[in-house]
Image: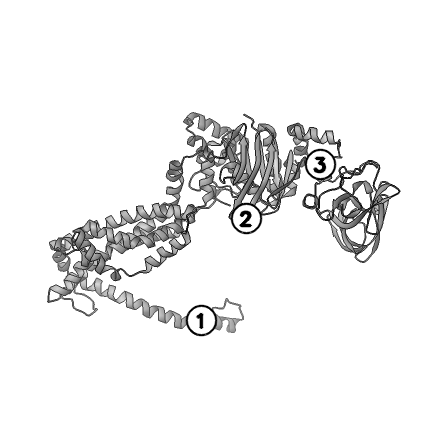
Amino acid sequence: MLSEVRFEGVHKIFGTETAVEDLNLTVGAGEFLVVVGPSGCGKTTTLRMLAGLERPSYGRILIGDKVVNNVSPRFRDVAMVFQSYALYPHMNVYDNLAFGMRARGASGKLVADRVKETADVLGLGQLMKRRPSELSGGQRQRVALGRALIRQPQVFLMDEPLSNLDAGLRVQMRAELSRLHERFRVTTMYVTHDQVEAMTMGDRIAVMNSGRLQQVDAPETLYDSPANIFVAGFIGSPRMNFVPGRLTTAQGKPTVEFLGVKAPLGAGARLTADATDADVTVGIRPEDLMWRKAAGPDSTLSLHAEVDVVEPMGHEAYVTALCAGETVTSRFPPRSGVRTRERVELALNPARLHLFDARSGTTILLRPIAGAADPPRSVGEARTDDSAEGRAERQRQPQARGTQSRAEEIS
Amino acid sequence: MSAVQARRVGAESLIVVPYNRVSAAAVATNMILILLGCFFLLPMLWMLFASIDSNPDWAIRLPSPTLANFVDVLGRADALSSFRSSLILAGTTTVVTTVLAVLAAYPLSRMHIPFKRAFMLAILFASGLPVSMLIIPVYQMYVTFGWLDSLYATALFLSASSLPFAIWLMKNFIDAVPVELEQAAAIDGASTARIVRELVLPLTLPGIAVTAIYTFINAWGAFIIPFVLTYSPDNQPGPVEIYNFMGSHGLFKFGDLAVFSLLFSVPVIVLYLFMSRYFSGAFNFGGAVK
């Protein structure tokens, strides 16, 4: 029953607008792939093409071994959860759940059994006689989910299913969706603009921007080794700091100059072949830029800055500071006592730097700079085997990775 | 009045009372509305009083009650046949118009059609054209086809003239049904026939009813088209019959006229009441999308 989904050179052009450009993407059988990107990046169009609601302008879409470009939605054996839920307003919950099975000519007995089963899984048992207008947002969401689950399709498609829920319910449903995926292991393509959903739910994340696929990787890989400035800036909150820098060679070693400091790249750092002495954009995650007084021994670089804004979050605080004419955000411990206008010393581990080509925005650092031991990551897990082999291995077997551990983390 | 009271209470007892101001503008507006309302209500009042008056004339006055006028009208064959004609005319027009309007409005609402906007504007323009403009060429056409004095052929032209507005109305009703419902049903595996039967029709039923009732009421009151296209006494619908009451009997039978008008208005009033129910409560897609 598990099917792989493949996009091969898919384009979608609306009039003069190119919504999706040359998309090549494989969703492994049983994988939970999250497609994330800003509004208008083509993620929903991609999903709708897979559902059969839009037809690709060029390229092929395969479900299993079958090219489905010309297969109507009805015969694709996919189920979709819409952002708006799209429940049938004149039918009660039971009929909403039963609709798809009845449409496929299932017998009354089978329909009744499966409706009951699905309702039990989702806790909808008491609501069977209600109409959608008599349900709360969370209940509607469950019905929409149930309508997809009951069909036992080859592929699940979800279009921002949590965006209409309030914050608390969203966290709860996020965990529930992960649990359901763990249980049924149906190939899932999940579209969202919310990077937290992407990071917590996806086996892998596909980042899209302006109709182009930017990077597909496991969440931690995406976070640690963003392929370009867009991915680096989109994943992670607060956003990664970007400051101009210059790549030079000192004593035969590549060195990067930025914010008035010089940082030699560690022995393990490998640059892309065409990286030369040139202008670069240096990326620094706020959690890698720490208060000197709270920093570990690996943070060998020191920067002097003037505090501009302090945003306490409770468990930590984000401090926006001016440093060598650039505005940077850094993570401070809670109750650090620093105030606006105060001069502080910031500490940075050079191994955590990201380097991007100043013009193209693509990364020029193949691996994060080796060297010091990794500090704890805000994503939750310490970085695992980040060698090229390890990364490829994870991509080959996305379902082997710990959805379970993440589900536990959330719940 | 309440405002005055409120102010006086407030001044005397120093209790703060909600303060309703009656402005000069509000008074003027209401006076004008009442005046306009009289223009509509007084003729109806005359119709009510005259219908049960034993000796009615132009004046509105309290009647000396009798049912003689009703007995008189209900005994007249032409009065009854005009009801039959009106029913055939309005019924046929309603069925033809509604079916065609739904069939036209659905693709206009849902599909990508070249020049759709221009087409919709043309429809809107057509719905504003007065039919009297067309009546002479249409008469000529009916003469040529030999369709004169046929109620069904007349209904055909009535349908054509009510279609533009009906399409426009119906399209707006279908637009209000979220297209995602149909997409969800298609992904759920439903055939087009099932989607139409189980989603589109039930969800647009209020719209279909409103379109049908609206068309029926218009056709029921249509005067100029049947007046020109039918001539035999058996085929004269109600509005033409009323005209005959006034024109051809020399001496006005005010009582009969009032009774006939009253009876002829009843279906329209009933349908309006029915339609208002649909307008107030039936358009509820709550829970469908967000």
Front residue of B21/B86: it is: B86
Q: Chain of mark 1?
A: B
Which quadrant: the N terminus of chain B?
A: bottom left
Please name the residue that numbered disc 2 is placed on: A17
Front residue of B139/A162: it is: B139
Q: Residue at x 71, y 36 (%)?
A: A221
Which mark identifies residue B22?
1
**What is the C-alpha distance between the residues marked 2 and 3?**
32 Å
Residue type, numbered disc 2: Glu
Residue type, numbered disc 3: Thr
**For mark 3, does the 10 Å Cα neighbourhood hold few (<14), some (14 to 19), or many (20 or more) residues?**
some
Please name which of the two marks, 3 or 1, marks the residue nearer to the observer.
Answer: 3
**What is the C-alpha distance between the residues marked 1 and 2?**
57 Å
Q: Of marks 2 and 3, which one's residue comes earlier in the chain?
A: 2
Front residue of B5/B248: it is: B248
Q: Chain of mark 3?
A: A
Have a look at marks 1 and 2 and say if they share a chain: no
